[in-house]
Amino acid sequence: LHLFGPHRYRLRVVGEPVAIPESFPQKVAVRVNGHPAAVLTFTGAQHESEAVISSELWKAGLNEIRFLYSTTARTDEIYSGSDARELGLRVESIELRIDEIVTP
């Protein structure tokens, strides 16, 4: 993700946890540039979660956002078929917007 400056950003994710009882609530750890940034929580009823991520974790230029799921399930365990991908959250949208402009 390319950013213009290390500002404080608000991350909003809309999605649905995989449909197995063990997956609720689905905790999603967010790492920014290799550092812990937030934990998002999704339940069967709550399909969106957001967090404010400190300006200290961002840098001007290329940034990496990584999502780590507390529970995953193989697609073929949930649905019929031979798809062996691991699912944690069906993501509808990811939004990142400036929450506060930080000036040096």
Image: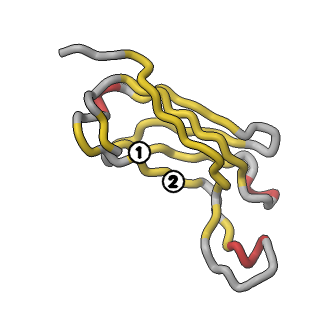
Q: Relative to 57, is 104 above or below?
A: above
Q: Quadrant of the C terminus?
A: top left
20 or 89: which is nearer to us?
Answer: 89
Quadrant of the rendered structure where residue 59 is? top left
Image quadrant for the N terminus?
A: top left
- Mark 2: which secondary structure? strand
Q: Position of residue 95 (x, y in %)?
A: 52, 36
Relative depth, front residue between 1 and 54: 1
Q: Residue at x 63, y 79 (%)?
A: 84
- How many C-alpha atoms fall within 10 Å of the one at disc 2: few (<14), some, or many (≥20)? few
Q: In the drawing, what numbered circle is on residue 31?
A: 1
Q: 21 left or right of 104? A: right
Q: What secondary structure is found at the residue carrying circle 1? A: strand
At x 65% / y 47%, what residue is drawn?
92
Q: Are marks 1 and 2 in contact (CB under 8 Å)?
A: yes
Q: Nearer the viewer, residue 11 or 25?
A: 11
Please state which amino acid type lies under the numbered disc 1: Arg
Residue 12 x %, y %: 56, 34
The disc labelled 2 sits on which kind of residue?
Answer: Leu
State how far apart marks 1 and 2 are (Cα).
8 Å
Give the class, few, some or many, for how many residues have Cα within 10 Å of label 1's Cα (few <14, many ≥20). some
* Residue identified by numbered label 2: 68
